Image (cartoon, helix red, strand yellow):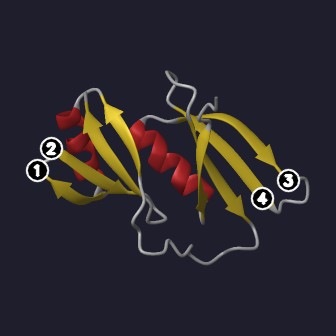
Amino acid sequence: MAKYLHTNFNVCNLEKSLAFYEKALGLREVRRVEEPNGAFVIVFLGDGSTDSLLELTWLRDHPQPYDLGEGEFHIAYRVEDKKKAHSLHEEMGCICFENKEMDLYFIEDPDGYWIEILDR
């Protein structure tokens, strides 16, 4: 039996990404790993209610944007109040796709990763 732990996104600007995930989804830093010579920083973010984490990895020697392939993958979050979340995401300018028939939408983080937003 396996237990899901985390998903990793590599990011170009760690502080910008941390601010985005805190504002957009309420995720907070759970723990941090910093390589002594500054080559990388790994920050795990949690929602405070599940064990699943989002791992953000910053690599000093990778200043260029990451190639996300065809962008055919995403992670999903369930929000308590989708109308309120949608208003916040609209204000942030991060909504990148909506499917009103399926009652869902996606936001895009600073590095181009897509996050599906669902309600209960």
- The CA span between labels 4 and 2 is 38 Å
Which of the two discs, 4 and 2, sits closer to the camera? 2
Please state which amino acid type lies under the numbered disc 1.
Lys
Q: State the residue position of label 2.
A: 103
Give the x, y percent position of residue 64: 61, 78
Q: Earlier in the sequence, mark 4 or mark 2?
A: 4
Which residue in the protein does label 1 denote? 100
Determine which residue is flagged by label 4: 40
Tag 1, which secondary structure?
loop
Identify the image quadrant of residue 45: top right
Q: Position of residue 96 (x, y in %)?
A: 27, 62
State left or right for residue 25 relative to residue 15: left
Nearer mark to the viewer, of 1 and 3? 1
Q: Quadrant of the C terminus?
A: top left
The answer to whether 105 is drawn above or below residue 48 in the figure is: below
Q: To which residue does mark 3 refer?
A: 35
What residue is at 76 percent from the left and 73 percent from the top? 61
**Disc 1 and disc 2 in contact, CB within 8 angstroms:** yes
How far apart in space, not on screen, are marks 4 and 3 (Cα)?
A: 6 Å
